[in-house]
Image: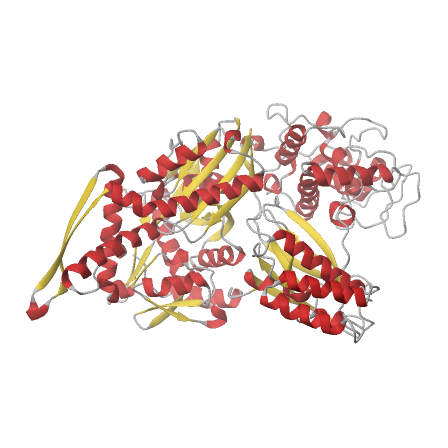
Amino acid sequence: MAVVGIDLGTTNTVVACARSGRVHVVADEQGRHLLPSVVSFHPNGEVLVGHAARERRVVDAKNTIASVKRLIGRAWDSDEIKKSRPRFAFELREGLGQGPLVVARDQTYTLPEISAFVLRRAKQIADAGLGEPVDRAVVTVPASFNELQRAATKVAGRIAGLDVMRIINEPTAATLAYGFGRRAKERVAVYDFGGGTFDCTLLELSGNVFEVLATAGDSFLGGDDIDLAIADRMADAFLLKHRWDPRAHPQVFERLRVTAEAIKVELSTGERARVHLRDVAGGVGGTQLDLAFEMARTELDALAAPFVQRTLAVCEDSLSVAGLSVSHFDKVILVGGSTRIALVRQRVEQFFGAPPLDRVNPDEVVAIGAAIQAAALADAARRRSIPPPPTPAMRASSPPPDDEVTIASPASQAIASLQPSLAATTHVAVAAAPPPLPRGARPAQATLPMLPDVDAPGSWRDVAPTSPRAARPEGDLGPASTPVLVDVTPRALLVETAGGFSDVIVPRNAKIPCERTRAFTTSSDMQTGVRVRVSQGEDAFFDNNTFLGELELVGLRAGPRGAVTIQVRFEVDEGGTLRVLATDIETGMQAHALLQLVGIAGTQGVAVMQARHAGIQVR
Amino acid sequence: MAKSSEHIFSWLGVLDELNYYELFGVDSDATADEVREAFHAFCDVFHPDRHQGRTAAERAALSSIFKRSTEAYLVLTDLGLRGQYDRELASRPTARPPRMSHSVRPRAPQRATPKPIKIEDAARTPSSRPFARRADELIKSGDLRQAKLQLVMANHLEPANEDLKAALKQVEAKLSERPGP
């Protein structure tokens, strides 16, 4: 079984694999590295994905689905969906729980299902290219994706039959591809301008550690917007000449959009682009109306400038969050197809004051990084050895309060370690000699660990040098040679408080994994339940943020208002997944409740979608 | 080979006894760069991704240990938080070291409610209630400045009401965050 990294892009999808120390992009049967993220429902019942599907955009736009990444994980009433609906040639409909549905050939599909078609094709390519089945993958998403968009992406993976080991951010993956093996100490800025999203992520590299300093993004800003602007210009020209507006005809406009993309690409190298589209529409008396369109690089620059300006504002934002200026950065890495636009390069260079780096193909760099991370996570043998802890300063002179753990001396640690689940909360007597051990618990050698002297000064770092050569591997390959990512929360996590305000529990750009706890009280007399509403965003008004879900804690002791305290704990794991737990500590009863994400199908829903997928052939 | 496993639980056992400096093994006057370097070294050893092959119990313990380091890193690299932490630490030399989420940023318990409660409900006297009600309306319409004035009045009429005080503070905080037109 192989593991791969998948860059599931707005426009293209790329699969890469790291095996026996080499990372490479997996090509399809015809040697192509990019798989267009387009799904077309053919009249013969087949589902086409990739190049074949993209060709059908111009003939069967209604049943050819592209750019769903711009919509995935968004609510039906969100601005992005409202903005996109008239622009897409395929039909969107409101589904259960505000999730948008795509309509194709009288069938409706959820957006994760559409993405799953692309992932299935990617898996097919990888299976064939690697000569062994792929079962696990690291999938990348824009750094600015919120919790719902990430969860929806995970669901897509599950429908496609992939175990999504981790969702990682595209700019971080790109940095991994760039910095892996360099063992350098430097600060890099990643400028990631893709088909549908823009991210700016700032990282600090030292050795194998990749620390994300800050990230900012606009998940609705990409090359698609520039294509649209060009297509609009073409439609204007056509309207002026023939008094017929292609925008009113989705199929025709889709054709203009495809052409617009080609013009944009051509102008990345050339100075002028010229197209002649035949039979755009039928004129009076059965005549055919053609469109001859010409565009100069300077015209494209003028169209693209406002979008590029927006990306630079996002860069400013990330710098201010990190409290750094452009001069603090050693490198700028370009990621995403839109960075091929000459104006983009020029502006980025101006902004950062240094020529951007594009050593690695901007289309492939993200998948390569994902593959590196996938390989690092897949190795079950990977276990870094842990040195003994330092000795805390002597603070035992005052008796600990009743509700606290008795201070455990190092001598008692061996005992504590035999009760792992209780170690943190149980009173551990300071024993002069270790008591007899349960039979078979540990080999003799392990029961007498080399513990530091109680008064031993110094830190764990003295005990365990962290240089890779000095570290003692624990019966495995040197884990020190694999990268470790320390990522951040892209947006603040909030709960709603009195007056509909937001209260930040986990701030934006907090290092993960992390945990934050906040105490709440009941607000009315005899209240026996509370509801904690959770959202994600930066707005001071709760409702202006992305609502993630809510949890209810019932069965509280009925008392006067404010008498019952509820502890709400937010946990973000190393994969960025949020868990919210509410605990009623006061009554001594522990009641936990888990946050249900809105609009995300449960295991049952996924099973249904998987079953439906199983009956559909993908080519 | 099982030594690491024991060390993991040893770390967990002393975790609450270690202050943030001890956790990273840096001096209390360590520079931001030194703290960062120590954090990176800590990541290299303790990051959960480095321990995919361990048992669930070990992984849970490592997760707790590592989460403490992200907390410590945040405090020690933020001048304001670090100053506060140092003062707390100095004021309780024999007690457990403070934790950011528990003591460095003390907060009055806040309300979690079945629905967003109104400030009006917090007002307990007939004289303060109309002002609180007006404040609710103004907040809803987005006029924080006027809402603040109403809350100042409500507080003036009912000075002992902690909830009204908290509401005023919150509005003031939001006002300073997003200066209105």
Question: In the figure, A151 relative to A377: above or below?
Answer: below
A240 on left or right of A181: left
Q: Nearer the viewer, residue A198 or A384?
A: A198
Q: Quadrant of residue A210?
A: top right
Q: Residue at the location (51% across, 66% down)?
A: A599
Question: In the figure, A506 relative to A284: above or below?
Answer: above
Q: Residue at the location (41% across, 63% down)?
A: A81
Q: Residue at the location (84% across, 28% down)?
A: A453
Question: In the figure, A373 relative to A236: above or below?
Answer: above
Is residue B136 something that shows in the picture?
yes
Q: Quadrant of residue B80?
A: top right
Measuring from the top left, give residue A391's x and y in whole percent: 81, 33
Q: Nearer the viewer, residue A577 or A232?
A: A232
Q: Residue at the location (40% across, 65% down)?
A: A82
Count of numbered tags: 0
B53 on left or right of A240: right
Measuring from the top left, give residue A535's x and y in whole percent: 59, 60
Residue that sits furthest to the top in the current view: A469
The colour mode here is: secondary structure
A96 on left or right of B128: left
Question: In the figure, A527 relative to B10: above or below?
Answer: below
Q: Quadrant of residue A410?
A: top right
Measuring from the top left, give residue A285's x and y in whole percent: 6, 70
